[in-house]
Image: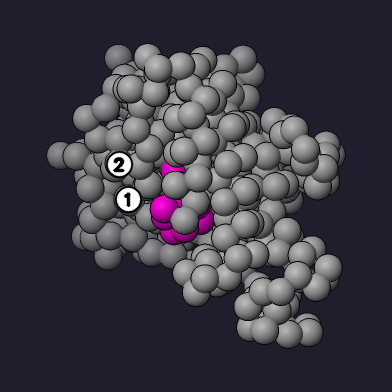
């Protein structure tokens, strides 16, 4: 049996795990990314984590390769991290550099694609042929898995659903446009909306829980808690975000025809608070033939999704390369 390393790289943390051929995580570690130390330092850190998790599992000499999920734009075929704002990376030859440090073949891809691939094939989408995954966190992105294969599109840019502009929305987005889905319905977008309403002195428990400068600590999880406590403002924010996500998914479903839509990231933690308005909005706008065959699920693998997806994509691509 061969084993594969999966690495999920984020702006805050790196998760590194060792995965068997069945997609089961045998062991994993999580450490701060520390991107401020520079690219070479992060690469050295990743190589050390690979060595550590391999040693902990007692599998030196049995690891066949490494898969890495990276935020931002990537060229997965040449192994280059083209641009990552979170890491301050541009045109980093990641595959060759980490391979040199580990003496193992290295395959890279976008982190959302790896997360969705893990969930689609080994998690909430297990046994389903056509899966659309949506991550709702600091940003919003998506990926499509069709019969175990990821859809990339021209120049590998498929999946940027978060940058569709939504009618009636005007919040500025980090991409440079105004009114993007990501700016309005992401976790950070919901927090921004809550702060705006609090500044307008709308009554809410949130202003009591986070007075003055404490408001900077407000998170999307706090909005969920306030909603559970009966706070009308929190309910309005969560319902509005869910409705926007539902509207954005309508053309995606009509174009891609998934059987299952998996919601991951912080959105999965909000659960039915977010999914109920999302589902109601989506189903009310779909053609009947689509409405009757698509279901919505939350992600189930947590941090393991990106690790499993990265490891198993590396395995698949390595086998194709060797054939």
Q: Quadrant of residue 170?
A: top right
Q: Which residue is mark 1?
A: 300
Front one among 296 and 14: 296
* Structural distance between the alpha carbons of marks 2 and 1: 6 Å
Q: Would residue 281 be visible to someone looking at this image?
A: yes
Front one among 231 and 93: 231
In the visual, does 265 lie left or right of 40? left
Q: Secondary structure at mark 1?
A: loop
Q: Where 145 falls versus 261 (above or below)?
A: above
In the visual, does 140 lie left or right of 258? right
Q: How many marks?
A: 2
Name which residue lies at 63% across and 78% down. 205
Q: Which residue is mark 2?
A: 124
Q: Magenta residues? A: 263-272
Residue 120: percent from left, percent from top:
34, 35
Q: Judge whether residue 46 is colored magenta.
A: no
């Amino acid at each position: 049996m061969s084993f594969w390393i999966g690495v999920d790289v984020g702006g805050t943390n790196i998760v590194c795990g060792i995965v068997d051929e069945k997609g089961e995580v045998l062991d994993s570690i999580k450490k701060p990314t520390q991107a401020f130390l520079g690219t070479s330092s992060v690469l050295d850190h990743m190589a050390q984590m690979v060595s550590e998790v391999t040693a902990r599992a007692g599998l030196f000499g049995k690891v066949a390769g490494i898969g890495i999920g990276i935020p931002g734009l990537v060229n997965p075929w040449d192994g280059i991290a083209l641009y990552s704002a979170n890491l301050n990376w541009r045109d980093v030859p990641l595959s060759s550099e980490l391979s040199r440090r580990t003496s193992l073949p290295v395959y890279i891809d976008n982190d959302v694609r790896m997360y969705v691939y893990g969930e689609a094939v080994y998690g909430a989408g297990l046994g389903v042929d056509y899966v659309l995954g949506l991550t709702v966190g600091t940003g919003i992105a998506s990926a499509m898995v069709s019969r175990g294969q990821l859809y990339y599109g021209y120049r590998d840019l498929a999946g940027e659903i978060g940058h569709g502009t939504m009618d009636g929305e005007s919040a500025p987005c980090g991409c440079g446009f105004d009114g993007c889905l990501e700016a309005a319905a992401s976790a950070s977008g919901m927090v921004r909306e809550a702060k705006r309403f609090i500044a307008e002195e709308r009554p809410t428990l949130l202003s009591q829980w986070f007075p003055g400068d404490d408001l900077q600590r407000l998170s999307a999880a706090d909005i969920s808690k306030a909603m559970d406590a009966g706070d009308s403002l929190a309910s309005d924010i969560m319902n509005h975000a869910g409705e926007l996500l539902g509207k954005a998914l309508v053309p995606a479903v009509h174009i891609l025809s998934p059987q299952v839509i998996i919601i991951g990231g912080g959105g999965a933690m909000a659960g039915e608070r977010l999914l109920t308005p999302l589902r109601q909005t989506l189903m009310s706008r779909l053609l009947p033939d689509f409405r009757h065959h698509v279901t919505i699920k939350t992600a189930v693998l947590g941090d393991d999704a990106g690790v499993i997806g990265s490891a198993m994509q590396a395995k698949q691509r390595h086998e194709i390369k060797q054939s």
